[in-house]
Amino acid sequence: MGEVLGDNGDDVVTPWEVSTSSSSGVDYDKLIVRFGCSRIDDGLLQRLANVCPKPLHHLLKRQIFFSHRWFQDVFDVPLVIQLTDDEKFLWKNLSISEVNHLTRENAKDIIAMGFDPKKTFIFSNFEYMGTCPDFYRTICQIQRLVTYNQARAIFGFNDSDCIGKISFPAIQAAPSFAQSFPTVFENLKKPEDVGCLIPCAIDQDPYFRMTRDVAPRLGLPKPSLIYSVFFPALQGNQTKMSASNPNTSIFLTDTPKQVKNKINKYAYSGGGDTITEHRERGGNCDIDVSYQYLRFFLEDDQKLEQIRQDYSSGKLLTGEIKKELITLLTEFVTEHQRRRAAITDEVLKRFMTPHPLHLPFI
């Protein structure tokens, strides 16, 4: 559905599927051209550094990803997080009760990352739709401006798709506009003038290309976007992690033993077939999953560069780079579980009940 193909026809990137036959992963340069995006180049990073009171986040410097919480901490901005439980229901074989449970669990994981409730509103589409007429009005305004033919061309819908899928893109688009959140932004005199920055993986681009197209006709500012690369499956860069296959992913609920076993058993190696070969030729960091994960989680730039040099030269063996990753991810997952255990239903309610957010810019 709405797939993006590389020149060899092997890259598939949609909001619902990501795969490639290339061991080095999806060709992002081709996606950038296809989607009409621009890279975050050194010039843009320098402009950001000039106005940022803290050092740039390592995921920005490495052109990988970006952290919501980092922007919230550094620039003191409000954050609205949409949980698309309706999308899960429409695309996956799940019941309403199963989706509701997953949504609450996802919200707890998000809160455990350290967001400030005074600046953060997390909402479920199922719940918020019934409590906020302004949200539904914005959805309808968007729906009227997008024809079925346009939606089919953008998302690849076919005759067997339910009508819920066809109307869903407008629901995903509506939170791009502050007018959808009258309580959250009640202190704004003109919410229609407030811009929005949306962080997401690049497979979500079709939704927001559509959103940017309709924004001027609504008299609203176009949302800006910052895209992340995909987090690869343990088996390699050909696809992203999948919750449906536990052996492709490290879960936030995994025990230290599970983390260790998954990495040792399933993490694809870019090293040589034998120690002798590896010492002679070195490892390939571009396809080595352990190194790719370290790029996400290891904040120390100098240490990461040393690991890259040592592994590429053959000085560092596959087992040793996996050990580095196991230590790092075990600490990350264990600390996350500690913070998550402290999240009560009352804390969850505080984040998910519409409330005015701190707005330092008014």
Image (spheres, rainbow, N blue to C red):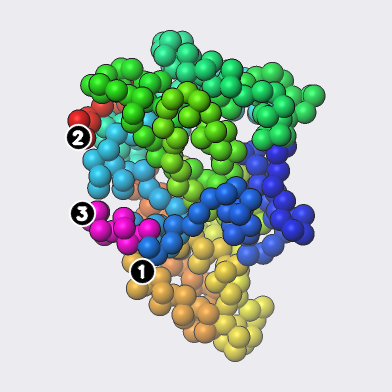
User: Is 52 included in the stretch rendered in magenta?
Assistant: yes
- Determine whether, in the image, residue 70 is placed left or right of residue 308: left
Amino acid type, label 3: Pro
In the picture, the quarter occupied by the N terminus is top right
Relative to 11, is 218 above or below?
above
Between tags 2 and 1, which lies in front? 2
Q: Nearer the viewer, residue 142 or 303?
A: 142
Q: Which residue is mark 2?
A: 360
Density class for disc 3 (Cα within 10 Å; few <14, some 14-19, many ≥20) is few
Q: Which residue is mark 3?
A: 53
Q: Position of residue 101 (x, y in %)?
A: 50, 24
Q: What secondary structure is found at the residue carrying circle 1? A: helix
In the picture, the quarter occupied by the C terminus is top left
Disc 1 to disc 3, C-alpha distance: 19 Å
Q: Which mark is residue 52?
A: none
**Magenta-highlighted residues:** 44-55
Q: Nearer the viewer, residue 214 or 104?
A: 214
**Identity of the residue drawn at 80% across and 24% down:** 159
Q: Position of residue 169 (x, y in %)?
A: 58, 27
Q: What secondary structure is found at the residue carrying circle 3? A: loop
Amino acid type, label 1: Asp
Q: Nearer the viewer, residue 310 or 14?
A: 14
First in sequence: mark 3 vs mark 2: 3
Disc 3 to disc 2, C-alpha distance: 15 Å
Amino acid type, label 2: Pro
Q: Quadrant of residue 194?
A: top left
Q: Which residue is mark 1?
A: 301
Density class for disc 1 (Cα within 10 Å; few <14, some 14-19, many ≥20) is few
**Identity of the residue drawn at 58% across and 54% down:** 32
Relative to 192, is 5 above or below?
below
